[in-house]
Image (cartoon, rainbow, N blue to C red):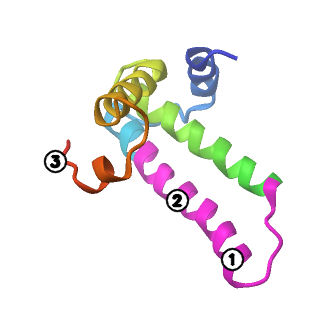
Amino acid sequence: MKVNDYQKEAMTLLNPALGEQDVLMNALMGLCGESGEAIDLMKKHLYQGHALDRDKLIKELGDIAWYLAEAATGLKIDLSEVLQRNLDKLHARYPQGFDTLRSQNREQEG
């Protein structure tokens, strides 16, 4: 599946009652909430004796993907642009691949 196709199909499930600004706000809040659910699964695994529930974690990652697509939609850009800009930033930061020293001594980024 192509990422922009995912975005287009996922947004057919968007709440039609949301206004333009509400789409972005809902997306950002949803990203925080779903990320919290994902890390809670890892917390339970690491510190409470639970087996890592890979299926639940995959579902939470899917929810994160949905909200990321909604955020891109709220910004009126394709999800592929969000992903490409991230790669561009990371390649500029680590031109030879990840480097611990470059990671520790980064200039402030936007």
Q: In the rendered image of this protein, does residue 34 appear above or below residue 61?
A: below
Q: What's the distance in space between the residues labelled 3 and 1, CA to CA?
A: 33 Å
Left or right of residue 2, residue 50 in this image:
right
Left or right of residue 38, residue 92 in this image:
left
Circle 1 sits in a helix, a strand or a loop, which is it? helix
| Quarter residue 9 falls in | top right
Name the mark nearer the viewer: 2 or 3: 3
Q: Which residue is mark 2?
A: 33
Q: Residue at x 73, y 48 (%)?
A: 59
Please provide percent x and percent y for residue 45.
73, 74
Which one is earlier in the sequence, the residue at label 2 or at label 3?
2
Please provide percent x and percent y for residue 57.
72, 55
Q: Residue at x 63, y 22 (%)?
A: 6
Which mark is on residue 73? none
Left or right of residue 46, residue 90 in this image:
left
Q: Which residue is mark 1?
A: 46
Q: Which residue is mark 3?
A: 107
Q: In the rendered image of this protein, does residue 69 appear above or below residue 4?
A: below
Q: Is residue 64 magenta?
A: no
Amino acid type indicated by mark 3: Glu
Q: What's the distance in space between the residues labelled 1 and 2, CA to CA?
A: 20 Å
Amino acid type indicated by mark 2: Gly
Q: Which residues are magenta?
A: 26-54
